[in-house]
Image (cartoon, rainbow, N blue to C red):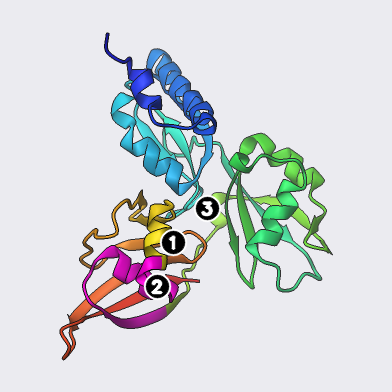
């Protein structure tokens, strides 16, 4: 007796992943039966990659993703979702006295309210403003309850998604690699040896164009967006060859 679509969809997942993906499958099934939209919570890049790989076993409902802005890493999965219908809101977190707070500080302030991680998307921190993308389920609670960020007094207010202009800032890192293998480029990106890069790839912490990279010898060509969890995200440009027959590359890292 063959496996059902749901069994195939959940195959190979650990207990925690199965719980999250069972909810996604059930929402897709509900969308298929009703024709109406259904949504999950925020997913990590790995979860998005895994869901895309398993979409052939999902019920027949159109799958799409949205995280509040173009290029978001954490996104909500929607089934039969129309543009503008995703339950994603943005809050600006403000403090008159805070200086030097990091992504971890702002995330910690939200988690300190008892909010589950899957209800929070990306948090964009800049000298001008900090914006957190959150599930609309918790919007009112966050606006009413957030009173600090780090050790500083702070407040949160909703801002329209259309008001958010994500200006990309970059810093470039150039060098040469023996080949355009993923492990070689990744090693240059993180400033460590190829073995350290391979460990990150094996640990599922490296993504190419949003898809989890599984092989150290994956061949790149230039133009890819490479994400290494814990190190950031960069766009790869490949150039000519050096006198020692190595390839010139530039990594344009988002900061």
Task: Using the image as rendered, state which of residue 13 and residue 30 is in the foreground.
Answer: 13
Measuring from the top left, give residue 234's x and y in whole percent.
Answer: 39, 68
Instruction: Identify the mark nearer the N-term, 3 or 2.
Output: 3
- Left or right, 87 with reference to 140: left
In this image, 101 relative to 133: left or right? Answer: right
Marks 1 & 2, CB-CB < 8 Å contact: yes
Q: Quadrant of the N terminus?
A: top left
Residue drawn where x is 52% and y is 52% of the image: 162
From the viewer's perspective, is the residue at label 1 or at label 3 nearer?
Answer: 1
Query: Is residue 136 rendered to the left or right of residue 144?
Result: left
Mark 1 is surrounded, within 10 Å at the Cα level, by few (under 14), some (14 to 19) or many (20 or more) other residues, namely some
Report the number of numbered marks: 3
Residue 162, label in figure: 3
Q: Secondary structure at mark 2?
A: helix
- 202 in the magenta segment: no
Q: Which residue is mark 2?
A: 189
The boundaries of the magenta stretch are: 172-195
- Measured Cα–Cα span from mark 1 to mark 3: 29 Å
Of 90 and 2, which appears nearest the observer? 2
């Amino acid at each position: 007796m063959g496996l059902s679509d749901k069994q195939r969809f959940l195959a190979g997942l650990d207990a925690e992943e199965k719980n999250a993906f069972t909810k996604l499958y059930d929402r897709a099934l509900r969308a298929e039966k009703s024709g109406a939209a259904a949504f999950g919570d925020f997913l990590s890049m790995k979860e998005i990659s895994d869901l895309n790989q398993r979409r052939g076993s999902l019920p027949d409902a159109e799958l799409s993703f949205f995280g509040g802005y173009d290029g978001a890493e954490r996104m909500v999965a929607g089934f039969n979702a129309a543009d503008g219908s995703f339950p994603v809101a943005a809050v600006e977190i403000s403090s008159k006295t805070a200086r030097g707070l990091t992504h971890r500080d702002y995330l910690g302030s939200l988690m300190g309210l008892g909010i589950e991680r899957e209800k929070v998307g990306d948090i964009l921190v800049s000298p001008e403003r900090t914006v957190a993308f959150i599930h609309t389920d918790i919007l009112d609670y966050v606006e009413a309850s957030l009173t600090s960020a780090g050790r500083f007094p702070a407040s949160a207010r909703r801002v329209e998604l259309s008001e958010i202009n994500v200006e990309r800032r970059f810093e470039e890192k150039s060098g040469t690699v023996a080949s355009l293998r993923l492990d070689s480029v990744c090693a240059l990106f993180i400033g460590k040896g190829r073995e350290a890069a391979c460990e990150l790839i094996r640990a599922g912490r490296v993504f190419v164009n949003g898809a989890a990279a599984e092989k150290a010898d994956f061949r790149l060509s230039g133009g890819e967006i490479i994400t290494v969890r814990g190190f950031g995200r960069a766009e790869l440009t490949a150039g000519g060859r050096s006198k020692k027959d190595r390839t010139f590359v530039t990594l344009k890292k988002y900061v």
